[in-house]
Amino acid sequence: MTQTTIACDQAIFTSIRSPMGEGYRIVAASRGLKPEEKQAITRCSPSHEALCAPRDESGSDADATGTAFYTLPSGRLCAAFTCNAGAEHTGRGGLRVYTQNVVFAETDFAKCGYNPLAVLRAMKAAGMTAPQLCIRTPALMPGLSSPVLPSLELAVDASGVQPLDGSLCALLPRSRRCCVARCLMDGKAVAVELPKGWTEWAEALVLGIPGPLRAKVSFGAGLRFSVGRGHCLQIFHDERRAAAGRASAQGIRFVDSETSEDAPESEWLSFVERHWSQGDVHGLMRRTSRPFADCSPEARERIGRLYNATDALPQTESVQILSLMTRTLAELGQGVEREIRLELCDAAGCTLLDRLSKARWNDVRALWSPLLNLWRRGGEATVFAQMLVACVLRSAVKDDPQAAAETALDVARDIPVGVDRVSHDGLLNEVLNRLAEATTQLSEASRARLKDIIHRWQTARPTCPIVAGLIERCAALQLGVART
């Protein structure tokens, strides 16, 4: 994922005194915003005392920030950043709450890695998260109720995801975070009470579901619990302990430090949880932020199974890996799932090559039959198996050149489509040349077997000069034995 640029409209929601009155409302907006979009932004934007204050030594109420993301009635998407902006001017005390909103097309969401937090980071990089209480715009035209903000081009870096700190990871244990992710994928609203780390966990949880599903997963992070905003996911601190009852009354799943829940069994959640437990949000993003054509529960389980198989390769027996490759290469399919299966094959190939390059012939001879079956399938299977065939034969050549030559006869004829013939012929020549070098060290019993092997090679490669040379060597050896 690289940097992209998306076209956005914008709106500022806060409370300022103006000729049009005071109180929380949209105080400035782009011309491109539709009335129904403004209404939705007004309904979803937080007002007085709506921010959760940091509860550690480094923060104060003035430092509080919140984020939100949701779909507008028009189908466009809204990403919002909320902060405090000085004292409340109405005299009721406390701090003024200020929200900067950007609105963009759903078709641009994939460019952003399906990640709302990438858009919010782009807002910060563009200086849009600093409150503008004195909005300078061209002179207001008659009939306009608020200043006009320009539309803008926002540069979004979809790859800039930070690791999840270990202390934050511990705030939401395995069973609870898996429960939240399952709720989101099932379309159920969930409220999560945490003392801090609201935005970080919002990103980690959103990245735990397939990218194309995320446009419909609205969230608020660092904002006090609200039934009215109606987000799918709300992450907040509730020092008054009042949110649980309100959430339950609305059928919203409530998760906090006292929630006891078994982690749901799921191939998809299994690999997602592995990334969460390691704080590896970037690796999670790479795997889940892909343009999946099918995000159904069945498809998620298929994809999860592939990712889990990839991660388990270091602990998987070599013969089992070959069996896995036989099944995987037989059902490559199309699109993203095909890409993931090919990634599994690449990883499996690297694992096997690393093992085989260090193995002795007696340790790998049991792999030859399943490897040969895979090699004979043609196409992608043959391409995958070819490098392993070469590795096995080279292991055999080092330990037993005669056994290597006899084994290589299995791949000397009826060569399937997909084999690199130049490379393959070079491998066979390498095996035969090493056999020729070793003929003088063979025992008398081995020489008797050598004659049969050479005869079979003469049938397989009747015009090969290396085979002709082997015949002459064998004859010379027999003559030498007879003279002796």
Image: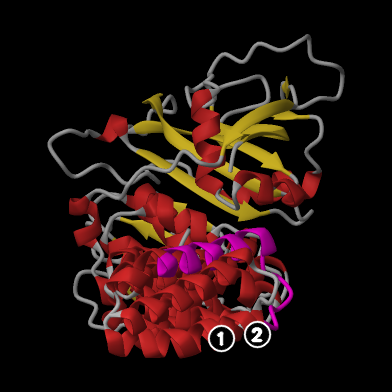
Q: Residues within 10 Å of mark 2 (few under 14, many from 20)?
A: few
| In the displayed structure image, the side of residue 119 where residue 274 appears, left or right | left
The answer to which of 274 and 29 lies nearer the viewer is 274
Residue type, numbered disc 2: Thr
Magenta span: 413-436
Residue hosting label 1: 455
Quarter of the image with the N terminus in it = top right
Farthest-out residue, front: 483
Reply above or below: 173 against 451.
above
> Residue 484, position in %: x, y?
28, 80
Please identify the dominant SS of the magenta region: helix
Q: Is residue 246 visible?
A: no
Farthest-out residue, right: 142
Residue hosting label 2: 459
Residue sitting at x 67%, y 63%: 420
The answer to which of 416 and 401 lies nearer the viewer is 401
How far separated are the C-alphas under marks 1 and 2?
A: 6 Å
Q: Quadrant of residue 315?
A: bottom left
